[in-house]
Image: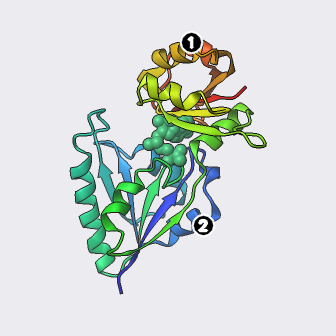
Amino acid sequence: MSGTLWGIGIGPGDPELLTAKAIRLLGELPVLAWPAPLEGDGMARSIAAAYVPVGKVEIPIRLSFRPERDDTDEAYDKAAQTIAEHLDAGRDVGVLCEGDPLFFGSFIYVMTRLQGRFAVQVVPGVSSPMAAAAMALRPLSVLDDAVAIIPATRSDDMIRALLEPAEAAVIMKVGRHLPRLKGLLADMGLLANAVAVERATLPDQRVMALAEAETLSYFSVILVHP
Ligand SMILES: C[S@@+](CC[C@H](N)C(=O)[O-])C[C@H]1O[C@@H](n2cnc3c(N)ncnc32)[C@H](O)[C@@H]1O
């Protein structure tokens, strides 16, 4: 019998924010794969480090994380092939995914390559909007608020069009888009309502009014709520 592919959400950074199920699976599954930079362990493997027993078979999925994403397909094709060999041999494989696996998660690239050939199960994880709201002590939504989730990579026009009808918003993938976003939110009269959370729940986390943020890394979200 073939093995099962598991997408394992490991939360936003604090190792105490893994679910009991994720921790159990990290100990039990014979093979673990994780996205990583070209060298070193990267964020997902570091978050899970305390729960990965020594001697586990591990498959780093090496990515350059260049904005052009020109190496992504090849890296995931190669990883999917290696993972498929383990699954064909009857070994279950867990793929670590920062935050939640199906919310902008890297696990999606593995799942889409293997779904249909193998059984797939997903363990949800604490996602960055929830973690950021908790760290900033800011509600994401109340009563019937409509919340927009907006990648900062979208055009100004699209971001405006999504913000306008929403009562609240989470802007993801901030990084180099910070100056543009500050200008846009100021134009819309929303800057005073915006909070930035960088590396939520990690030891070097920063929480600040967006108006005061001068730089923010890719691992940042902006929460907008009146
Ligand atoms: C590729 S998406 C992955 C989202 C992830 N699967 C989740 O559930 O949060 C990466 C984006 O998530 C956000 N993010 C992930 N972890 C974060 C953290 N610890 N603090 C703030 N933002 C984070 C950032 O906006 C980042 O650009």
Question: Eyeballing the image, is 27 above or below 184?
Answer: below
What residue is pinned by disc 1?
187
Q: Distance of mark 2 from mark 1, alpha carbons?
A: 45 Å
The x and y percentages for residue 10 are 54, 54
Nearest the viewer among 50 and 222 is: 222
Q: Which mark is residue 48?
A: none
The x and y percentages for residue 109 are 35, 55
Relative horizontal placement of residue 168, taking residue 42 as reference (left or right): right
Quadrant into which the N terminus falls: bottom left
Which residue sits at x=38%, y=78%? Answer: 3
Amino acid type of the residue that numbered disc 2 sits on in the rendered structure: Lys
Amino acid type of the residue that numbered disc 1 sits on in the rendered structure: Asp
Q: Which secondary structure lies at badge 1?
A: helix
Residue 201 visible within the image: no
Nearest the viewer among 177 and 225 is: 225
Which residue sits at x=34%, y=73%? Answer: 116
What residue is pinned by disc 2?
21
Residue at far right of view: 143
Which residue sits at x=38%, y=47%? Answer: 41
